[in-house]
Image: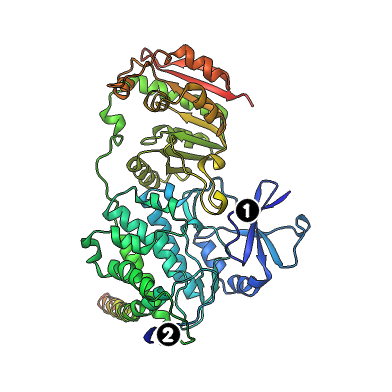
Amino acid sequence: MIESKFLTAVVGYIDPGNGSLLIQIIITGILSMIYVLKNFWKKLYHKVINKFKGK
Amino acid sequence: MQTAHSASFRDPSGRIIKHDGEIYRTVNNSYKEQFDYFLKSGLYEALTKEKLILRFEEAKPELFDKAAEVYKVIKPEQLPYISYPYEWCFSELKDAALVTLKIQKISLDFGMILKDATAYNIQFFNGLTVHIDTLSFEKYNEGEGWVAYRQFCEHFLAPLLLMSYVDISLNQLLAGNIDGIPLALAAKLLPFKAKLRPSVFSHISLQALGMEKLATTSYKKSSNISKNGLYGLNDNLTSLISSLKPKIENSKWSSYYNKTSLYSSEEQNVKMKIIGDIIGELKPDTVLDLGCNEGVYSKIAAKHSKNVVSVDYDRIVIEALYCKAKAEGINNILPLYLDYTNPAPGIGFENKERDSFLARADFDLCIALAFMHHMVSDNNIPFLMLAKSLSCICKKLIIEFVPLEDANAQTLIKGRNIDYSFYTKENFEREFGKVFLIDKTVNILNSGRVIYYCSGKK
């Protein structure tokens, strides 16, 4: 089963929901790439701006 | 006298206890490691510095007979009033959601994560939106997902989307669903255009589908979710929620003071002075403004008291008052939705997990201006029943009698086949006099309206 291969055992007092966890794996897979790219552009943007400002 | 709080049984990390009217929290041995790490890691200091979580102090050990499972007893800052998400306006729920996400982000920075994300962990205190549960944090283990992701979506995202896309009143669904709005229900109710947004589709529709189809899957140990993935999830939820606006259509009561010529400006000024004088002299700690509308009198009360809870059964005026008070930096007014003829009930296990409005109401002063005729002539609540009910929620009362001849009262009774001969000032005074001592009466010039200042007899 794909899902049992990917899901992590989670210990908590609330039920995270098995299906919810699998969806979280898919969503965070995509969002982590977006997050990394976004941060990269942010850093690059500030570097360029600071260079032009002569800092 | 120590009593365990009836809402405090779900999380085995600790319990809330009441001692001499004050709230304490026990930290159990099972949570010792996490609690110590919460303090040592600097997360507690960082969150309190940003005023995102209540400060606490360790309670004097001699106060409590510590049970074997208890590691520590702490005393958090005391809240003057507890409110619930089904009483909040859109912007209150939105602020609560954004604060939760901000706390989650800071927690990740410090190597911890929120183990629960319920809306009941957030309260409004001194103009701040704060997290009240010190035991909501656990160490973050690389690869693990956010256990409280589904809970966050059910408690915050689903009601906010419904209030934004369908109807501003839909946080009421939380009163019937103590664990939050089921995502499958939210997916059914949301319009197609909302689900066209990739983030709405993923967090609501896809998650609901996953929960339905994969409910019986068994777990297996592995590392799958990166920390950047959790930051990305947090970032995405923050952007989505920040972009939402309440679905507002014109309400009957918004701009009430501008559109409805109830009073001449002279009469209005007299009324404001009367109320200001009474509250200024009384200086109450807590005030309830019933039928607050745009909060004209709440603001007067706020100048002379510590905390004002302003309630109205029009969600739009509550939304407007919350935003306005926030913009004006008034930090002691808490606007909440309340229909006095159907106040928030007790919900959860034994109806005790979340107290009813009446169980929480214990105000030094209640202001009920242009309110009584809505109860008596509009809802047929007898004077005595209303007086008894009000005497249970406050020690002092300022109430306005609106005569039946008043244009506003006439609008309410128009077309009704009811004998209103009982509705007289004399009957009002006699019936209210059975429960309250009338300390002062002031006529508002020639309007026929009268302000009564009363004290509860018990």
Specify the quadrant of the image occupied by residue B235: bottom left
The residue carrying pointer 2 sits among few (fewer than 14), some (14 to 19) or many (20 or more) residues within 10 Å by Cα, namely some
Position of B72 with respect to B364 (left or right) is right
Circle 1 sits on which residue?
B5
| One can see residue B97 in this view | yes
Quadrant location of the C terminus of chain B in the rendered image: top right
Which percent across, then down, holds residue B9?
60, 60
Disc 1: host chain: B
**Mark drawn on residue A4:** 2
Which percent across, then down, holds residue B390?
52, 30
Give a yes or no on whether discs 2 and 1 share a subunit.
no
As shown in the figure, which amino acid type bears the numbered disc 2? Answer: Ser
**Mark drawn on residue B419:** none
Which residue appears at 58% of the width and 22% of the height?
Answer: B435
Which residue appears at 52% of the width and 29% of the height?
Answer: B279
Q: Is residue B33 above or below residue B260?
A: below
| One can see residue B236 in this view | no
